[in-house]
Image (cartoon, helix red, strand yellow):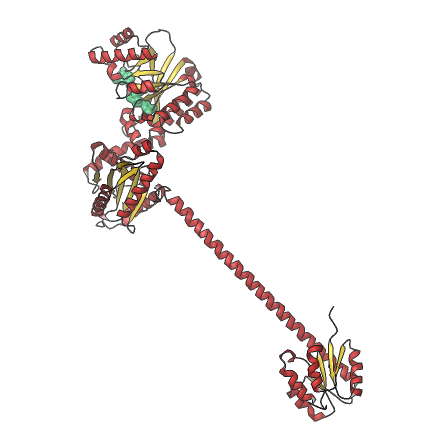
Amino acid sequence: MDSLPTVLIVDDVPENLRILNDVIASLDCQVAVATSGERALELLNRTQPCLVLLDVMMGGIDGFETCRRIRLLEQHKELPVIFVTALADDISLGFEVGGNDFISKPFRVDEVRVRVQHQLEKYRLLQELRELTITLEDKVHERTADLNLLNRNLRKEVNERRYMQDRLKYLAQHDFVTQLYNRDALDEHVTHLISDLPTQPANAPLSYFALLDINEFRLINDSCGCIAGDELLHQLAELLAEQIDPKRDFCARMSGDKFVVVLDNGGAEAVASFFRLFNQALEAFTFVWDERQFRISVTQVALPLTQQISSFEQLVMLADEVCYACKKSGVKTRVIKDADDMEFKEHRGNLNWGLRIIDGLEKDLFEVHFQQVCSLTQSRSKKKIEILVRLKDEVNGGLIYPNDFIRAAERFGIISKIDRWVIQHTMRELSKRTQLWEDIDQVAINISALSVRQANFSGFIIEQLEKYQLDGSKFCFEITETEALNNFNDTRNFMSLLHEQGCTIALDDFGTGFSSFAYLMDLPFDLIKIDGIFIKDMHQNEIHFGMVDSIVKLAKMLKKPVVAEFVENQTIVDLLKSLGVEWGQGYHFHKPEKL
Ligand code: C2E
Ligand code: MG
Ligand code: MG
């Protein structure tokens, strides 16, 4: 509870003190009394008055001097002082020394009360105002501090966010192993350069796309493990980064063992100098792993970004094509100078196959045909068929046969797309044609060894079997033996997953490859298809006859049935029967037709 305000009455006449005391006491105030100016000054701090009634004429220092001294005290500068005086001419001096009002003697009680009340009210309001100002100032301080803190936190949060965004952007654009740009970032950069081509002046030096393919990567990755492979990539990326001009050149890891450097507007000289520097560094480089030393070679090709290049994908396929051709002919470095380069034109021709296949898949230009496979031992057996893919020729009409495009599809890594299309399309068709499905004993579908190597390819086949509710044991998958089957673990795994579904697996075109026998011994094939080139002239070619004979004997020992391809006449049929071949396939029995 607030205590009552104190009024200090200063007078040396007891009668005056009494009268004033009575008036003040009736105003709900406490009274403090001093009988001299000196005493009043002493009492100030102790009584903390809200008002002083100060007699002018006193012994010792008079009222004016007392007031002057009060005003010198910082704490009481605003303390209201009312002079109590009998002399009219004192008034102006009283205001000069800091008095606020005066009361004249002899007292009139009403006047005293009004003047005292007025000063007390004024003082109270002043105090309230001061308190309000103080609280307001406190609040302002508090709010300012809050705002500062908020501001600091906000700035911190903005910085953290900016960092996260930068980090995310970095991760999205960089390769984890080498810290170089990744394929997406390269795509963006090259696409931008391609779209800028029409605005380039005709005589501006060309930008070049340099592809570097590590020849020994698979050897190291497969024989020493993928940690060694990653380390090799990391070291080569560093070597590469040292040879480029980071202000001009864009360096990326494009895929597994392929790096790309884009030399912006450097012309063919810049590429030649970059290849020279890189090769010097590579000469001095040895990769060491587990105390073994490896010399590394890198096939390097560079292509100009000319108006003929329409997209990043096309450029990559083209570079791959040139690189592949270099590897095949043992060339280490090849710079295509401009669009008139003859080889460049040839590669673009090859590349057309890649683009046609992609186009064919997009426009649904593929179709499936089938050829019957006939029993040579039983006359009334059920039907076996082999599915064969064809591509419709949009330009000239007619059909394009797989020998024309399968190799290109394998080269450009799109063969599995074709295989998936054929599997899906065949299964869908068979699920719709119930009579045909009933009549057929077995459907053989060709798949590339590159598809076998795809991690989820068997999963895809199983999915399709489930989707179309077809019995897996009616399907045979034919795989042609190639180098790509070399990874026996993957192949065995693939075969076992399909065997679980009841499918059989045939080794196609047996006899032409180098490792046919090894495959046959090491992998659980269910059927052997002898390559047609030995069959179609076996009645005229003793060596081919001998080959067929020994393959059949071997198959019998392994207890695997045999299919002979390219059976073109009855003489061949008779010969095959005499050797004990179970199945024949060829134009003599049936020419492939649309499914
Ligand atoms: P393949 O699996 O050995 O198929 C047999 C090939 O021999 C077929 O050629 C067929 O039309 C042809 N042929 C059949 N009978 C005779 C004959 O009496 N004489 C002669 N000279 N040829 C005959 P096609 O359809 O041109 O297929 C060629 C190869 O393309 C196939 O050889 C197979 O390896 C591959 N292929 C076909 N379809 C697919 C597919 O869907 N995926 C994959 N990855 N490869 C496929
Ligand atoms: Mg086949
Ligand atoms: Mg074949």
Residue closer to the observer: 474 or 588: 474
Quarter of the image with the C terminus in it:
top left
Above or below — where is 60 with respect to 547? Answer: below
**Does residue 122 appear in this view?**
no
**Does residue 36 appear in this view?**
yes
Q: Does residue 19 appear to the left or right of 265 in the view shown?
A: right
- The image shows residue 441 at horizontal and vertical percentages of 40, 14
Quarter of the rendering containing residue 44: bottom right
- The image shows residue 37 at horizontal and vertical percentages of 70, 86
Above or below — where is 179 with respect to 553? Answer: below
Above or below — where is 316 with respect to 165? Answer: above
Count of numbered circles in the view? 0
Q: Does residue 203 appear to the left or right of 370 in the view shown?
A: left
Q: Does residue 91 appear to the left or right of 370 in the view shown?
A: right
Residue closer to the observer: 10 or 508: 10
Seen at 21% across and 39% down, the residue is: 334
Residue closer to the observer: 412 or 48: 48
Seen at 34% across and 38% down, the residue is: 230
Quarter of the rendering containing residue 481: top left
Seen at 47% across and 54% down, the residue is: 158
- The image shows residue 258 at horizontal and vertical percentages of 30, 38
Q: Which residue lies furthest to the front in this view?
A: 291
- The image shows residue 200 at horizontal and vertical percentages of 26, 50
Quarter of the image with the N terminus in it:
bottom right
